[in-house]
Image (cartoon, grey):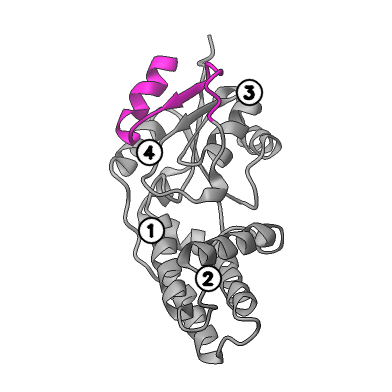
Amino acid sequence: MRSKIDTIGFDADDTLWHNERFFRITQARFAELLQDHTPLEMDPAALDRSLLAAERRNLGRYGYGVKGFTLSMIETAIEVTEQKVPARVIQDLIEAGQMMLSYPIELLPSAKEAVTALAKSHRVILITKGDLLDQERKLAQSGLGELFDGVEIVSEKTPAVYEEIFHRHGSSAEQAMMVGNSMRSDVVPIIDAGGWGTYVPHGLSWELEHAEPPEHSPRYNVLADLSGLAELVTKIG
């Protein structure tokens, strides 16, 4: 009898290592740089909404990751200052974005243990969105690279993308589990594809990754952290 699950897909950012915290640090720097150049009636919440709107508009142009975020900050700065933002501020925003590409990788609790344990019994694949070079850098620094049977850096995570990835790696969506901190990207689409989705919430999450949990599905699971993942996979079979 074939096991119910033969392949485990892992998200990267904020599932295996910290990531969103660096966006929050940079967004705070963005607000600081613009505080003397925006209209008096614009409060920090309104500035945040303007930046989020730019990020949403630009996903189709730039994709996910630091580069798109940096360009969205610049676009927002130009927009909210009515094209009066000083060149020095634009330069500072570029430098803030470049700084994000140099932050050291810090693994989340039980990340290495979970991947190591499951790599002994299952095919494990890293499936992540973001800038190609930045994701490759983070994976190399994480020390986890050699544990994965495959690495997929994609522009979007959809049911069709998951079906194609797992089929190409010798499995099927029905016999695969995706593990991640994004309900919208890591859980809902794999369940829609017929697979298993395991949600591991992170303390910080980007608003554009929110979605309603598929609580109706028997293939939906929630873990407080990755320490219980191997046990969950064994229980499912």
Most foreground residue, 12 or 54: 54
| Residue type of the residue flagged with mark 4 | Val
Which residue is denoted by mark 2 in the rendering? 42
| Residue type of the residue flagged with mark 1 | Arg
Tell me: 25 left or right of 45.
left
In the displayed orientation, state which residue is furthest to the top. 1
Q: Residue 194 carries which label?
A: 3
> Of helix, strand and loop, which one carries label 1?
helix
| Residue type of the residue flagged with mark 2 | Met
| Alpha carbons under labels 4 and 1: distance apart | 23 Å
Q: How crowded is mark 4: few (under 14 residues within 10 Å), some or many (20 or more)?
A: many
| Residue type of the residue flagged with mark 3 | Gly
Question: Residue drawn 71% across and 58% down?
Answer: 60
Q: Residue 61: percent from the left, percent from the top?
A: 71, 63
In the displayed orientation, state which residue is furthest to the bottom. 87
Q: Are marks 4 and 2 in contact (CB under 8 Å)?
A: no
Q: Do the residues labelled 1 and 2 touch (CB within 8 Å)?
A: no
> Of helix, strand and loop, which one carries label 4?
helix
In which image quadrant can residue 15 be found? top left
Q: Residue 94: percent from the left, percent from the top?
A: 52, 80
4 in magenta? no
Q: How crowded is mark 2: few (under 14 residues within 10 Å), some or many (20 or more)?
A: few
| Alpha carbons under labels 1 and 2: distance apart | 24 Å
Rendered position, 189 above or below 154: above
| Alpha carbons under labels 1 and 3: distance apart | 32 Å
Which residue is denoted by mark 4 in the rendering? 115
Q: Which quadrant does the C terminus fall into?
A: top left
Count of marks overlaid on the render:
4
Question: Residue drawn 56% across and 60% down?
Answer: 49
| Alpha carbons under labels 4 and 2: distance apart | 46 Å
Marks 1 and 3, the one that precedes in the sequence? 1
> Of helix, strand and loop, which one carries label 3?
loop
